[in-house]
Structures are given as C-alpha cells and as structure tokens.
Amino acid sequence: MSAVDINSSDELRDLYRELILDHARSPRHFGRLDDATHTAEGINPLCGDKLRLFVRLDDDDRISNASFEGSGCAISVASASLLTDMIIGLTVQQALDYFAAVTMRLAGPDTNQDQDSPLELGKIRALEGVRDFPSRVKCATLAWHALNSAIHGRSTPVSTE
Ligand code: ZN
C-alpha cells in the first residue's frame, strides 16, 4: 500500500467516502441493546431515515455500551455506526461535547471549519463531506441528536423537522 498524501484534499475525500460506505454496508453496533439505560428515536422525514439509539450508562456516568437499529440512507446509517463506535468508553460530558462539535461543524458556518477543535474528531470527520450537500446534513446529524435526546432522557422522538 502506498503512502497517502493527506495534504491532498481529493485523496482525503476519497478515504472519507470509503469510510462512509464501509460503515453503511457493515454498520458497527447494529441491533438492540437489551440492557440499555437510555434510548431515543430519531426521525428525518425529509429523507425517510428512522433509527433508535441505545446507550448503557454506568454508575460513574460513563457510556459502557451503545448500539442502534433502524433504517435509512447510507449517510444516516454510517453516521450512527461511527457514533456508536466513538462514544463507547466516553463520559456523558465527553459525548455531549462531541455532539456539540459535530453539529456545529456540519451545520455551522464555513468560517468555523478550519478552527482547531479541542476534540479529536478522528473518523467522524468523514461526515464533514456532507457540508457540500446541505440536504444531507440532517442525515448525518440525526444519530447525534438522538444521542443528545437519549442522554437527557427525553421520551418523545426527536425529529429533524
Ligand atoms: Zn438520509
């Protein structure tokens, strides 16, 4: 395998596209979490994405497990897969920090995009490609809104509309 020039935005975009497709085809942590302590449903009527997020919080406010089920477009499924991969092991506050960072970076003004984030976004930076497609931003942020809702214990489904 040849070295990847990460200074090339085209190659980086290709890598991110591959990552999204991989998670969409083979979602991680897919399925019901029977011992979940928190759960929330997310609905994006514009696209038809519908998912339920499951989170298991330990006594020390750490996310010990997470999963999701549902159906939707590739971006919504990949986003939920990346989310569950990322939040397991985090504290609630860290997960909420990521929620804030992701929703700001995907939906926020472009002037924010080059600012250094205090968080290591890692693979979820792959989702930033949707900024070029405003109608898909809600697909990418749906699982994150469901996470926020689950952690805050809201029982009504969160909708992007
Ligand atoms: Zn979608």
Image: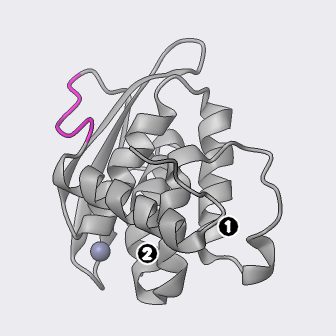
Task: Work out whether residue 3 can be spotted.
Answer: yes
Rounded to the nearest angstrom, the CA distance separating label 1 from label 2 is 12 Å
**The quadrant where residue 37 appears:** top left
- The crowding category of the residue bearing disc 1, from other C-alpha atoms within 10 Å (few below 14, some 14 to 19, many at least 20), is some
Image position of 56 with respect to 106: above or below: above
Point 20% across, 40% down: residue: 30
Image position of 144 with respect to 152: above or below: below
- Horizontal side of 130 relative to 24 (left or right) equals right
Q: Which residues are magenta?
A: 28-34
Image position of 137 with respect to 121: above or below: below
Precedes in sequence: disc 1 or disc 2:
1
* Residue 72 rendering spot, x and y as whole percentages: 20, 67
* Residue 45 rendering spot, x and y as whole percentages: 28, 80
Point 54% across, 68% down: residue: 128
Q: Which residue is mark 1?
A: 104
Query: In the image, what residue type sits under mark 1?
Result: Met
Q: Quadrant of the N terminus?
A: top left
- Horizontal side of 20 relative to 6 (left or right) equals left
- Which SS does the magenta portion mostly show? loop
- Horizontal side of 51 relative to 114 (left or right) equals left
Q: Along the line of sight, which residue is nearer the eye, 155 or 65?
A: 65
